[in-house]
Amino acid sequence: MLEDLKKKVCDANLRLKDEGLVIRTWGNASGVDRKSGHLVIKPSGLDTNGMKPRHMVVVSLETGEVVEGELNPSSDTPTHLELYRAFNRIGGVVHTHSVYATAYAQVGRDIPPLGTTHADSFYGAIPCTRALRADEIHNNYEACTGKVIAERFASINPSQMQAVLVAQHGPFTWGSSPDAAVENASLLEHMAKLAVLSTSLTPYPKPIPQELQDKHYFRKHGPDATYGQK
Amino acid sequence: MLEDLKKKVCDANLRLKDEGLVIRTWGNASGVDRKSGHLVIKPSGLDTNGMKPRHMVVVSLETGEVVEGELNPSSDTPTHLELYRAFNRIGGVVHTHSVYATAYAQVGRDIPPLGTTHADSFYGAIPCTRALRADEIHNNYEACTGKVIAERFASINPSQMQAVLVAQHGPFTWGSSPDAAVENASLLEHMAKLAVLSTSLTPYPKPIPQELQDKHYFRKHGPDATYGQK
Amino acid sequence: MLEDLKKKVCDANLRLKDEGLVIRTWGNASGVDRKSGHLVIKPSGLDTNGMKPRHMVVVSLETGEVVEGELNPSSDTPTHLELYRAFNRIGGVVHTHSVYATAYAQVGRDIPPLGTTHADSFYGAIPCTRALRADEIHNNYEACTGKVIAERFASINPSQMQAVLVAQHGPFTWGSSPDAAVENASLLEHMAKLAVLSTSLTPYPKPIPQELQDKHYFRKHGPDATYGQK
Amino acid sequence: MLEDLKKKVCDANLRLKDEGLVIRTWGNASGVDRKSGHLVIKPSGLDTNGMKPRHMVVVSLETGEVVEGELNPSSDTPTHLELYRAFNRIGGVVHTHSVYATAYAQVGRDIPPLGTTHADSFYGAIPCTRALRADEIHNNYEACTGKVIAERFASINPSQMQAVLVAQHGPFTWGSSPDAAVENASLLEHMAKLAVLSTSLTPYPKPIPQELQDKHYFRKHGPDATYGQK
């Protein structure tokens, strides 16, 4: 079942490794099929060497139970499930420990929009969640990770901001497809690197003004976009 | 028309990608033919994969209108036009979001001449423009970007300083040809990296004295240059 | 004798070079055969180019004397011996001067557990030893290096923390085999890099809480681990 | 004449480029033949692409005049001459603008011996010269660059410290041969990188004690060295 989606999810996981966003087995990509109510995700701890679409695990979006697949799904599956439930228009989710984004997550700070490069891809500061409480760590930790992300997005549009940092942990991104989520993981890492470099020049660089963010973001995104070819 | 210039502009855009100065489609190179009054520039949002000279767009230097080409010209075309108009001896313009130079642009600082490496290529501090005002962002944003560059160069010789940082945005460079502009984009990034590293050792490193700047710059540039082979 | 272990030790030394953890001849890996009471280690100053298992040197774990081999053993052999004696369940030891870990050793600081990436691999802060005293430098320096490591681990479990920084010097790691020790050297360098980046954002980033360390470490290690495939 | 030395000097210049210590034409290596009183050096501004031993220029150590060669010698030739005259046991000299070492030169600071990695290769802090005075910049600038290096080494043994930073400029290194000088340029860059990383953790890291420097330096260098194979 879902052969096409399995291939897309497998390819997304391979691209994460190729781009250096994931080392070892520290990351995962998934995709969702809203019609059938199924999520397809990388198996837990499986190396990308020799990884094939048939290794992907199919999980019920409603119950979180494995529907098909011989391997255990990623240990982060409950986080992915929460994100697909909270953001009902997204088609793919990615989790990495890419170094610059993780550095920001480790200090618990949003990545401010310091330049137009950021504004071209992300609308506003890339938010960092609060740290999980002890009870959230003890009970349903991975699901709670998804819940604090959803909580952080109470007043943020997940279509315009397709990335988040989980405090003390690392980044999650999403998009219309597994590959779009990988693209956002790559863009996030790039913005984090730019922000680290700017911060090395001055401790608290100032975000760019709202009108410049609007100009650049909406030049490339939404109904009035003028960038590129029609 | 302008087949030779189209090839040069295409090559310049490909070199930007090869040298890692541009990722995705975030940058552009153009060239000008002063005789015919035409500018040749990369299409908007076109990936360099498979990009050919015939994809380049020809634009009137006077009116800014497309003269030849099936694709939309780069969204930064009005900035390029302003630079060719303001600096009437230059033959090529390049825009990138290269990381070290962009880090400086994001904090709105000139790159000071901290050593002879800098002075060998750039005469004085590499200037950063003021930020654009809200009205400049709202009306003719890309043209205003060119105008604040020209404003910043009121008392700077654009032949001796072939690079600028646009505050909150990133670098533009120019030169006698599209390829010379790319070379300057590469040199700029190198100087920015050296300055970031020096700043990591001490927050405000001191510029080198004027006589040392003169010695190194004019050893390599201008009528009294002694460097290299005759 | 010990042909299989010689191959493993040789491979471990080659991997150190391949992964960029060792440059020049600045590092070494060894393995131990507890039954025969012998340690197998890289020769002193030997380049990895053309290095073969037959070049490995066999040393008595009890006396420290060469049992087999035509070349001098690594100058750090006495440190390795001390570690095998102090930590009697380990099978391999590695020493490198990898840059991020060495940067921490040079400032004499533990690498704090700043995120779950760290906690997935190391339980607690990666400890840094005290500096050696003058008398320890003058007499049996290399053995004393091993002794200060053992001293630092008085109340640390060397199975849960398989890495250490020797102050003013650099990292040592260990594991169940020579290859496992190399893996830990690689993981250590990655955590050090993440910590350097976080520290560039804020001078003293806060360690994550104990419960989050427990959650991540024991999700992957020990009898209750759930990560990966059974 | 000096065919063998020309090959060594050419190879040294090529290695500088291969190791990334020199970009563009920003660096040079030379060698000396004490018997004939000649120095062999890279031509000024010549790219390493297609560079051959026959392009090397032979210069008189006494007069500084070109003895053989069709191209102009490196503009830094007078600096090399001063070094060969001041340090009469060295056989090769190298100049680069490698980024980490140049960052230190740009802030005018010695690179302190922060760890045993440094002490294994350099005995003491790698010294930075004073800045040149205006009169030294105006008259015989390149020769004065050599003279301030010699001045800085008034009480330093150039056999134990084969590297220097020229303030506001960059590094020079030397050794028993052109290749040994390149090796030292590479080691210097590595120590500078380690020192930059340590400084990013704490602004003024403390040098290691003298006895530890002695231990490591003399373990590898001089008559009592024990490192490596006999």
Image: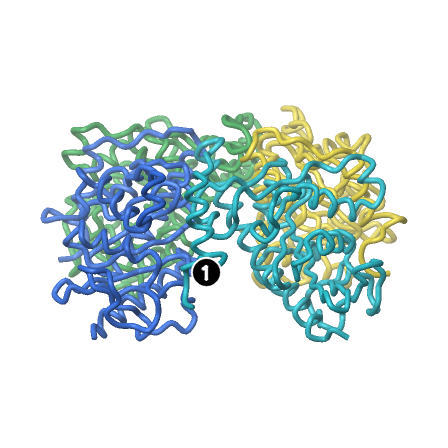
Chain colours: A green, B yellow, C blue, D cyan
Looking at the image, residue A129 sits to the left or right of residue D36; the answer is left
Q: Label 1 neighbourhood size at 10 Å, few (<14), some (14-19), many (20+)? A: few
For label 1, the SS is loop
Quadrant of the image occupied by residue D100: top right
Q: Residue furthest front?
A: D223
Residue D44 in picture, x, y percent from top left = 77, 59
According to the picture, the residue beneath numbered tag 1 turns out to be C24
Q: Residue furthest top?
A: B134
Quick one: C210 or D92, which is closer to the camera? Answer: D92
Let me know if residue B67 appears in the view. Answer: no
Looking at the image, residue A226 sits to the left or right of residue A6; the answer is right
Quadrant of the image occupied by residue C46: bottom left
Residue C229 in picture, x, y percent from top left = 16, 57
Quadrant of the image occupied by residue A80: top left
Looking at the image, residue A57 sits to the left or right of residue D17; the answer is left
Residue C48 in picture, x, y percent from top left = 40, 67
Q: Mark 1 falls within which chain?
A: C
Looking at the image, residue B1 sits to the left or right of residue A224; the answer is right
Residue at x 75%, y 38% (from the top left corner): D132
Quick one: B189 or B80, which is closer to the camera? Answer: B189
